[in-house]
Amino acid sequence: MFLLFKQDPTKKLNKSYEDKLESAICAQKNGNINDFSMFTEEAIKIRKKIQALENINKA
């Protein structure tokens, strides 16, 4: 019964990942390459966390 209320942690991370990518694209369009690289790096770190969680769930 309590599994009904348990949230999927990857859902929150996916939202954060998409937000970072969107911010990176906006920074790139505005010509701010430093912010673009910062947002992209953060998005990559989040994506690695998502992949790690997915691998744990598969095992």
Image (cartoon, rainbow, N blue to C red):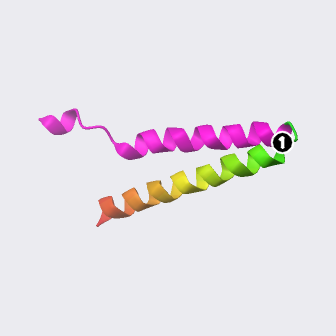
Q: Nearer the viewer, residue 30 or 4?
A: 30
Q: Percent from the top left, x then y, of residue 32? A: 84, 42
Image-quadrant location for residue 41: bottom right
Amino acid type at circle 1 is: Asn
Residue 9 belongs to the span the image colors magenta = yes
Instruction: Kindly state the secondary structure of the residue where label 1 is placed.
Output: loop
Taking the view exactly as shown, the residue that stands out farthest to the bottom is 59
Q: Is residue 47 left or right of residue 2?
A: right
Q: Is residue 27 left or right of residue 57?
A: right
Q: Percent from the top left, x then y, of residue 51? A: 46, 59
Q: Main secondary structure of the magenta part?
A: helix
Q: Is residue 34 left or right of residue 44?
A: right
Q: Percent from the top left, x then y, of residue 43? A: 60, 50
**Magenta residues?**
1-29
For label 1, the crowd category at 10 Å Cα-Cα, with few meaning under 14, some 14 to 19 and many 20 or more, is: few
Q: Percent from the top left, x then y, of residue 34? A: 79, 48
Please state, as top left, top right, bottom left or bottom right, where the N terminus lies in the image.
top left
Residue at (59, 56) in percent of width and height: 44
Q: Is residue 51 left or right of residue 59?
A: right
Taking the view exactly as shown, the residue that stands out farthest to the left is 1
Image-quadrant location for residue 20: top right
Residue at (66, 44) in percent of width and height: 21
* Location of residue 33 with respect to 26 vertically, above or below: below
* Location of residue 41 with respect to 9 vertically, above or below: below
Residue at (38, 57) in percent of width and height: 53
Q: Which residue is mark 1?
A: 32
